Amino acid sequence: MQFHPASLAEPWWKRGVVYNLYPCSYMDTNGDGWGDIAGIRARLDHLVGLGIDAIWMSPVYVSPMKDFGYDVVDHTAVGAQFGTLAEMDGLIADVHARGMKLMIDFVPNHTSDQHPWFLESRSSRDNPRADWYLWRDPASDGGPPNNWRSLFGGSAWAWCEERGQYWYHAFLAEQPDLNWRNPAVAHAQHDVMRFWLARGIDGFRVDAMWHLLKDPHWRDNPPNPDFRPGEPAIRQFLQIRTADLPETVEVVCGLRRVLDEFPDRAMIGELYLDYDRMCAYYGPTSDGCNLPFNQHLIMDPWRAEVVARGIETYEAALPAGAWPNWIFGNPDNPRVASRLGPAQARVAAVFLLTARGTPILWQGDELGLENGVVPPERVRDPQEKREPGLVDHNRDIARTPMPWDGSRFAGFSTVEPWLPLTEDHATVNVAAEEADPRSMLTLHRRLIALRRAHPALAIGAVTVLCGANDVLAFERRHGTEVFVVALNLAHAPRTVALPPAAGGRIALTSGLDRGGESVGETLCLGPDEAVVIAVAG
Ligand code: NOJ
Ligand code: CA
């Protein structure tokens, strides 16, 4: 079955590659060990060389940094450690001058507890912003009003002496959740969007999109029968009252209407949901989120059957006109090169950049960075501090600074950075990989260039050809142009019958070899090898 051919006139967020840039760890220019906006501007050439189309930049707002920028004190100002609003304007101009787009993180679900809105809201039960957050009276025993838990461990309710009430926080207590059922909150946050859109920002990555609404009757979450010890405590309960409420999509459509007041903008949305629920966020008539995150390559096992079934399930669930996306890494999960191993990370890169759907590439994955080693005394992540020792639960390990070169602080800073550098930074860094024709960076550059040059790879239709015996294969087609992509997910050779590839020539492999080789009806794949075959066109 062939899925949804697309036209050439597709917008940038469908055609292009999105790069998730993490400002704290990109480049430090003032020697305080933290990345800054001046650093991003100084290192834009890396992104130009890579060939990406759009940057999604994690938060640089004014913030006490309890959750590294996701605790916002002022949505329309830049935190001093990152720079100034004027520098932000300069960054927008620089990015645009290089033909790229700049999307920023938008954090609608919660603010910092230091935000003026919250300071006012917590001051009494009858101030003008009394209903801007989620306030509840204590239970009869004086304890929290229900069993809702924080994603970062413990109760999701924090006590406020002034009001004699609890406030709800899905994340840290210092990140109180806003009350999105209050129209004044929606108006205020819509104005934040307009502020940035008017400055030239090309769109948003909407944080915690599936958390925006909670049960209006404040009912308990039911126990999760599948909970296993060692998992984050939040998983003890199914989050049916606190996340992914069906009416959340209406809020998302409201965000989209604001976005559409400005031409050619886009919204990507954070969610961790199965294909069916995820696709609801596109909106009933594709009038919701342009790209609700597909996190299945992070959540699911890396197996040919699973990914093949995933593509077909996803394509079948997409509403008319909706466009997929694929993600292997983000600032909240262990690195793909550590999860799958370095050899399969190259296979994963081939999948990401040849699949039908916008690739969202996490900073450092283009270098094949592995998880950092963060000793207990250097842990920064509040999640790790509140629930130490859980498997795959330390977010610092994916957030280590970019290694630019082989110097002492890897060209990232002149001092010890806020998080340790990756241990192999003397050899695994941008400069070394630029000089290496077989490096992970070279592979990414070649793949992105190929995708850009061929509409079949960028916007073509997809047909799954094989999802068995460790081989995932699919066809991409646009007009007369046809490519076949075959991935070996095993560490041993595999042979696969692939008649649709017959007569084609190898355009690129994960090992950056075999270029030009002609292909018959049977394809031999080396261990951990992925092959892109140009068949026609
Ligand atoms: C998702 C962000 O990616 C994560 O880093 C943050 O802690 C939570 N949302 C809360 O804002
Ligand atoms: Ca700095």
Image (cartoon, helix red, strand yellow):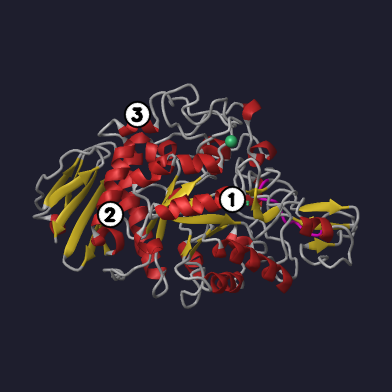
Q: Residue at x 44, y 26 (%)?
A: 425
First along the sequence among labels 1 and 3:
1
| Separation of marks 1 and 3 at Cα, in angstroms | 34 Å
State the image coordinates of residue 313 (x, y, percent, origin top left): 38, 64
What's the residue type where badge 2 is placed? Answer: Arg
What is the magenta range?
145-152
The residue to which callout 1 is attached is 86
From this view, report whether residue 247 is shown above or below residue 74.
below
Residue 70 vs residue 465: left or right? right
Q: Which residue is situated farthest in the bottom direction here?
A: 285
What's the residue type where badge 1 is placed? Answer: Ala
Q: Which of the 4 image quarters holds residue 16?
A: bottom left
Q: Residues within 10 Å of mark 2 (few under 14, many from 20)?
A: many
| Separation of marks 1 and 2 at Cα, in angstroms | 35 Å
> Which-is-in-front pick, marks 2 and 3?
3
Q: Are marks 1 and 2 in contact (CB under 8 Å)?
A: no
Residue 190 vs residue 306: left or right? right
State the image coordinates of residue 176 (x, y, percent, origin top left): 74, 55
First along the sequence among labels 1 and 2:
1
* The C terminus - image quarter: bottom left
Q: Residue at x 32, y 40 (%)?
A: 346
Q: Is residue 449 visible?
A: yes
Q: Which mark is residue 432?
A: 3
Q: Quadrant of ligand 2?
A: top right
| Separation of marks 2 and 3 at Cα, in angstroms | 24 Å
In the image, 461 versus 42, the foreground residue is 42
Residue 93 vs residue 163: left or right? left
Ligand 2 within 8 Å of the CB at mark 3: no
